[in-house]
Image (cartoon, grey):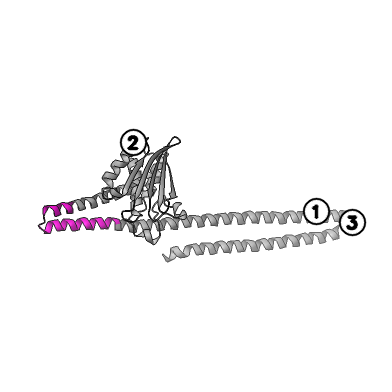
Amino acid sequence: MKYTAKTPWLFYALVAYIVLQFLWWEVLLTRQTSQLAEEQKNISALHFSDKNLLEENLKQIETKKNHQLWMHVGEGTVFLILVSLGVLKIYNTRKKENELARLQNNFLLSITHELKSPLASVKLQLQTLQKHNLEETVKNKLLQKALADNERLLRMIDNVLLASKAENENNVLRLEKINLFETLTKLVEQAFEENKSCIKIAFTETVFVNADEQFLSIIFSNLIENAIKYSPTNSPIEINVQSQNNYAVVLIKDEGYGISDTEKENVFKKFYRIGNEETRSAKGTGLGLFITKNLCDLHNIQISISDNNPKGTVFMLKFP
């Protein structure tokens, strides 16, 4: 780790040394050129007796000197520009690598916690069932809880696998005509049964789109889960389905903590999670919105984020 930390400074120190050495040699070369020109002028003064020929020769020497000086300046400027561009490129590359390493480290920490929690919960429930003679209703509750934790694990693993495929342009879409209202209603009832009382779906007309049903369900699931995760318990979530100017539009509105303008630019990046303390305790791996954005791009769906009024966030999907 110490070597990694010191390496950039050694590199920048070496670059600085090279630049200073180059500037010093540039100064010496300029001086040498001027001195050589002066010596040539002195020799010419001794060699030519004709005043007109002497002035003509001196002008040629001065012109040649100026040409050489400008050539040195031009070559030096190009060299410094190339060195500066190289250093800037290295700096930006290292900065991106450090940011990616930080995000990956956060991902490893979060995925470890996300995997450990449901596994520990399932283990506890199974041990309870094994060691105690419980009533049938209690057994059923424990089994349902274990199944829910298992489903959470499966969704998480699916997200990790899907993230590795999301950037693949060779993904094949199985397009079919889908009723948005029916799909959203079914999804909320099945995947968000515990929270469906606070999720309201509104539509002004029946809207159909051509999409891959599996991928579309993942897009909606991630956005709804995101709205639940970053909102107070039982906070209302509204889903509007409408048609606008030959576009099918879905608006997912929450009244949660909101997303700042600077965060809006980053939330679709791989492994990125909103960093304020209010939401940092929320579960997640930083892959949901990354997957959502890539699947939207695959469908040519426009996705955007805006602020809700008076608080919260609005995700808008525009289907072609």
Question: Label 1: few (<14), some or many (≥20) within 10 Å?
Answer: few
Name the one closer to the observer, 164 or 255: 255
Q: Position of residue 299 (x, y in %)?
A: 40, 39
- Closer to the camera in the image, 244 or 2: 244
- At x 73%, y 59%, the residue is 33
> From this viewpoint, is residue 169 visible?
no
Q: Is residue 211 left or right of residue 138?
A: right
Label placed on residue 157: none
Q: Is residue 184 above or below residue 52?
A: above
Residue 112 in percent (x, y) is at 30, 57
Residue 31 image point, x, y percent: 72, 63
Residue for badge 2: 179
Asked if the residue at tag 3 contacts the one at tag 1, i.e. Cβ–Cβ closer than 8 Å, the answer is no
Q: CA distance from mark 2 to mark 1?
A: 85 Å
Instruction: Please state the extent of the stretch shown in magenta in the rendering.
Output: 114-143
Give the side of residue 175 with respect to residue 246, left or right.
Answer: left
Q: Nearer the viewer, mark 2 or mark 1?
A: 2
**Disc 1 target residue:** 60
| Earlier residue among tags 1 and 3 | 3
